[in-house]
Amino acid sequence: MAVDVRRKIPSVDGLLRSDPARRASAYLGRSLVKRTLGDVLDEARRAAANGIEPPADEILLARALGRASRAAHGTVPVINATGVILHTNLGRAPLPERAARAVAHAARSYTDLEVDRVTGRRTTRGRNAELLLTAITGSESALVVNNCAAALLLAMSALAKGKQVIVSRGELIEIGGEFRIPDILSASGAKLVEVGTTNRTRLTDYRSALGDRTGAILKVHPSNYRMVGFTAAPTATDLATLARSRSIPFVYDIGSGLLHHGHGHPSDEPSVSDALTAGADLVTFSADKLLGGPQAGLVVGRADPIRRLRRHPIARAVRIGRMQIAALEQILAIVAAEREDELPVFRMLRDPPDVVRARAQRLSETIGGELEGARVVRSGSAVGGGSMPGTELPSWAVRLRVPNPDAFVARLRTGTPAAFARVQEDGVLLDCRTVADDEVPHLARAVWYALEGDDEHDGLHGDPDEG
Ligand SMILES: *Cc1c(COP(=O)(O)O)cnc(C)c1O
């Protein structure tokens, strides 16, 4: 049986000679088309081995050419109507225009990336961002690397390789599938010493684990989950005091990049300034979470340990790129000038529900006010990016009642412009907290496109509970 179905699968060369594949090869390159054809045929062959009938040649061809074309187009801008502000799969923080321009300039030409224009001497690529960071946070020193995972790997390698690092069992977290505290520590060459229990760790647990081989005390903010109930953990101040009494560094990975409290949004996130005030020697955080910048890992704290990080060979392996640094400098300059409301992430966090509601109203009207199915409804947005779990921001959305919500959101994703929405019960929710004002007409267009492709039904369903 399986042998019989497998025989129906065409050869790569056969399909490469077809007209559509020739045209695609001329445009995208023969090697790319050949590669995606090979992949698609391999998949069909494996499926056939499991008794699954291979699709027609035209379908295989379309699948392969679609894949080649998407790869050649690269990542495309999408409209985020999920309501999740720091959506890691959608790139986390959108940047303000000023940062986007800086990236474009840095991309197109040579820059003074590592030279001081005044002296003509070589300098470090992080100097501007690091100066801004020390000014903003009041820290002695700062260091910029590729991302927060890299910052922690570098910190542990430079300070605690071959030594022990004490971490609470309640903080051995995983973030985003690949980032696990025990794995980062073992990759750094430091030895993890777990103390306490999942829900309760006391200062005495840390104290009794301290010894000659201790390289650091590490505190990690459990960004993406919350423990409630019978819990306990020593404060950062207690840990800093204990570490200082033994002359070992205290490193605090706060992750989220909240600089100060009092920005007006509800939060039980630790802030950079709290962590420094508590006495942390090093504080590590991401630039593309609550700070609202590009991907980068930021380290602030005392000059001496930061010097050790800067000189470590891993610092070179995790250095930041020239376009990222260009964006980061603009973000930090905006924060230093106290003009945070220029940052899209900051605005999305702060927009009052009425503003979001008015946007949803505009979207609903643009989609087609006469369509009963496009209703403005209450919704709840999430911060996302592993920040502030359980915190729901009151939001407003346009709800579309469509016969097949999953198929509808799939067409939204693959349209131009592409948009991402939430499926909810029997409808699709377009949360307007994460939609920019100037995206409203484009999102409406995306919805029209997705509705047209709906061959089960031509249009929206009226809402039965509206009579
Ligand atoms: C998000 C997060 C990280 C990883 O940050 P990236 O910049 O994505 O590498 C590390 N630690 C904590 C506590 C985090 O929240």
Image (cartoon, helix red, strand yellow):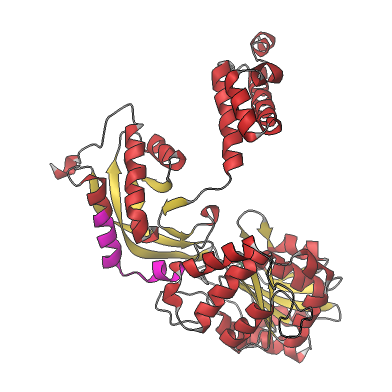
Residue 67 lies left or right of residue 464; in this view the side is right
Residue 14 lies left or right of residue 308; in this view the side is left
Residue 170 visible in rendering: no
Corner quadrant of residue 173: bottom right
- Picture coordinates of residue 122, whole percent (x, y): 79, 78
What residue is shown at x 47% (from left), y 81% (from top)?
A: 261
What residue is shown at x 61% (from left), y 18% (from top)?
A: 18
What residue is shown at x 77% (from left), y 81% (from top)?
A: 120
Residue 327 visible in rendering: yes
Q: Is residue 451 magenta?
A: no
Quick one: 447 or 89, which is closer to the camera? 447
Please provide the residue range marked out in magenta: 345-362
Residue 287 lies left or right of residue 39; in this view the side is left
What residue is shown at x 25% (from left), y 37% (from top)?
A: 460
Quick one: 403 or 24, which is closer to the camera? 24
Q: Is residue 356 magenta?
A: yes
Corner quadrant of residue 156: bottom right
Q: Is residue 46 above or below residue 128?
A: above
